[in-house]
Image (cartoon, grey):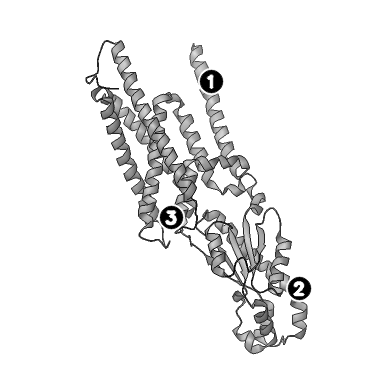
Amino acid sequence: MQIPKPFLGAIGGSFLLIQLLFLGNMSYLYGNVFNDSQRMKAFTILLVDYDDSIVGQSVKAAYSQLESPSFPTLIEHSSTDYPTSNDIRESICKGHYWGAIYVNPNASSRLSAAIASPKAAQTYQNTEALTYVWNGAKYPSYAQVISSSLQILVQGTRSAYNALNGTAAMSTANTTDTNIAHVLFDPIGAASIDLKPTNQGGRFYYNTVTMVMVILPQFFFVMALNGISAETKIFETLSLRQNIALRLGISVFFTFITSLCMSGYIWAFREDWATTHSQFPLTWIILWLAMHLHFFIMDSVTAVLPMKFMPFFVLTWVIVNVSSTLSPFELSPGFYRIGYALPAYELYQVLIDIWTRGCNPTLYRSLPILFSWWLIGIFAFLAATRRRVLSLSISLESRGATISDPEKV
């Protein structure tokens, strides 16, 4: 059997290009999270000590033992910087810190009283010593890391207190009293505050698979639209203005319904996730904007890129966009901060802002970037449609045929 050399050359080239495509894209994807466990110190946690006594000292001693590249960085501020606990919550809400832990006022005196008095020990609640705060809706998988780190810090504080003051307290305490013994055994605990509890199973999809589904339907539909347009000779039948109006109308309607469907299944599987009436339409609107700009991008690229190269573009576009939402940029190598300019990252930031009722104030950046992509997309879409009609007109003229409506350009 004689196999033509052009065939072998083409197959060999495709073989090599496909390997490089997936190797490059997956290396980019994996590189985003490579050794991220050793960059956890990039997460910052606020410490405020309203007590200024042994409990606060124990927190700092515990952190000194836990401090490492794999543990978030504890940053202490005075109570004058954050006069109330609401100020601390506001700081987390604004994204200044990933979490916070604070020592409640009079925590040490309550603990000392409980160790000294059976009556005080009976009413003592160790969770009144500390409080920690985090935002469960902001990168849910990493929010769990923050929550777990804060819990570890609380456990370490308990051990540090025993090391600093346990022996002295035990030497003077009435250890035969059950309540006092219980206090000595478990002196320090913490109350936890999740600014936006996000415990539904689907939470791990919001910044991963969901971002893919914003892009892929646009590609599939654009391919179908192009195929149907070619079969029905719609470019020959309609003028340039009519073609633009038709495709623009179809793009608006398709992305409008697709974004509604996505918002619908996010809400249908939200379980006990607390939402408001305004969050659904806001989610729908921002998803529509993102899907529409991706539609423009896909439609424009298909007008200039040969079909055999479309998989290279689509896969790469999906990977770079999804990579920007997989994990916080604090954990990624600096190069990956190019994701700030990508629509998927800014879309996810807006969604967090919507779902947390403003606890991710990046709209000043995210909305202009998304609208910029949309404007670039619509200009590219207009140019692409014009190119399609002109190319067809030239092709028909070369065959001696004419288009029904000469008012094309």
Real-space CA distance between mark 1 and mark 3, rounded to the nearest whole angstrom: 49 Å
| Mark toward the viewer: 3 or 2 | 3
Q: Up-down: is 337 above or below 140? A: above
Mark nearer the viewer, 1 or 3: 3
The answer to whether residue 307 is left or right of residue 83 is left
- Residue 23: quarter of image: top right
Residue position for label 1: 12
> How would you rate the neighbour count of disc 3 (Cα within 10 Å): few for under 14, some for 14-19, many for 20 or more?
many
Measured as percent of width and height from the top left, residue 267 is found at 38, 55
Helix, strand or loop status at disc 3: helix
Q: Residues within 10 Å of mark 2 (few under 14, many from 20)?
A: some
Residue extending furthest toward the front: 80
Q: Residue at x 28, y 33 (%)?
A: 245
Q: Which amino acid, by three-letter code, is at mark 2?
A: Leu
Residue under numbered circle 2: 164
Spatial CA distance of label 3 from label 2 is 45 Å
